[in-house]
Image (cartoon, rainbow, N blue to C red):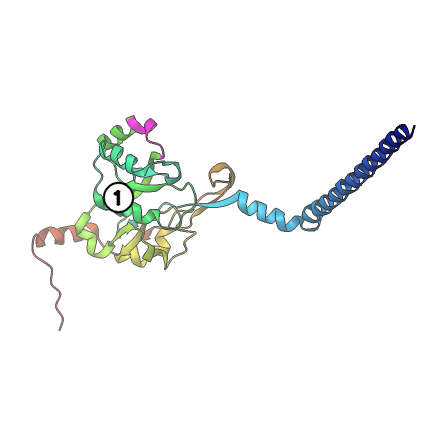
Amino acid sequence: MSNRHQAFRNYREEKQLTQRRVIAAAIFVLFLAIVLMARLFYLQVMNYELYQTKADENRVMLVTDPPPRGLIYDRNGVVLADNRPIHSLTVIPERVANFPELKRELSGIIDISDSEWEDFDSRLKEYRRPYQSLTLKSQLTDEEWAKVSVDLYKLDGVQVEAQLTRYYPYGEAFAHAIGYVGRITSKDLERVDRLAYQGALFIGKTGIEGFYEDTLFGEAGLSKVEVNARGRIMSELEKQNPTSGKDLHLYLDARLQQYAYDLLGDYKGLSCCN
């Protein structure tokens, strides 16, 4: 009789213990739910503007579009510095899994000099936005363009882009005055607005090209794009087209300058003073 009573008593105690444990667990879960809700309220209501701004900064990126460079004319409207379209071989580093293998494959298709690879490697170490293409070889010939285009499907990260480059119809005859443009270096970026020149390939180095750089360069376009977590552009939200650089009209006479240049031939012009 006592054994039955003991068994019944143990069963009742175990049931009560289980109920207490369930109640304690329910209270603990309810406490965690309250903490979670309070945290969500703090993040989504109290600090909504702060985290919304941070989210937009991570999701939205500004990308610049370099403007066409202004032209240079002589006194009669003859073009001394023009823009001409070229095709350049560019690479998106983030899409390349194996650079040594890519170098081997490209070298077997077209001739890429060591200096071009060294220049590419140095620019690869500089700051740039994710998934921004870098020029490996500019001014591809028609034959090189055709060879690369055939194998583009198996060259991950490689593409052929149409770009504008400077063209001087009179060549050396005006080199001393017009000067020239060259590829932008890290030293050049120290004296210009990096954002405005993002994506630009060339900058005025000497002569009129260098002295009137601010006038000839124009104003870069600006695009607001949506990117994913890895920085890849997914869509374009807003776009402001670039403004071409201003043209320059000089007092030089192209025909007279060319005539003097032809007369001099291999001789160097000398200047004299009293």
Using residue 13 as the reference point, say whether residue 139 is left or right of it: left
Which residue is depicted at the point 81% across and 35% down? 18
Q: Write down the residue under mark 1.
A: 117
Q: Which of 185 and 99 is in front in this view?
A: 99
Q: Which kind of residue does numbered mark 1 sit on?
A: Trp
> Is residue 9 located in the magenta-colored stretch of the structure?
no
| Residue 258 drawn at (x, y percent) | 16, 50
The residue positioned farthest toward the left in the image shown: 266
Q: How crowded is mark 1: few (under 14 residues within 10 Å), some or many (20 or more)?
A: some
The segment highlighted magenta reads 151-157
Which residue is depicted at the point 33% across and 40% down? 163
Which residue is depicted at the point 29% across and 43% down? 165
Decide if residue 262 is in sight here: yes
| Quadrant of the rendering where the N terminus is positioned | top right
**Picture quadrant where residue 56 is located:** top right
Q: Which of 8 and 262 is in front in this view?
A: 8
| Residue 184 drawn at (x, y percent) | 32, 51
Using residue 16 as the reference point, say whether residue 33 is left or right of it: left
Decide if residue 250 is in sight here: no
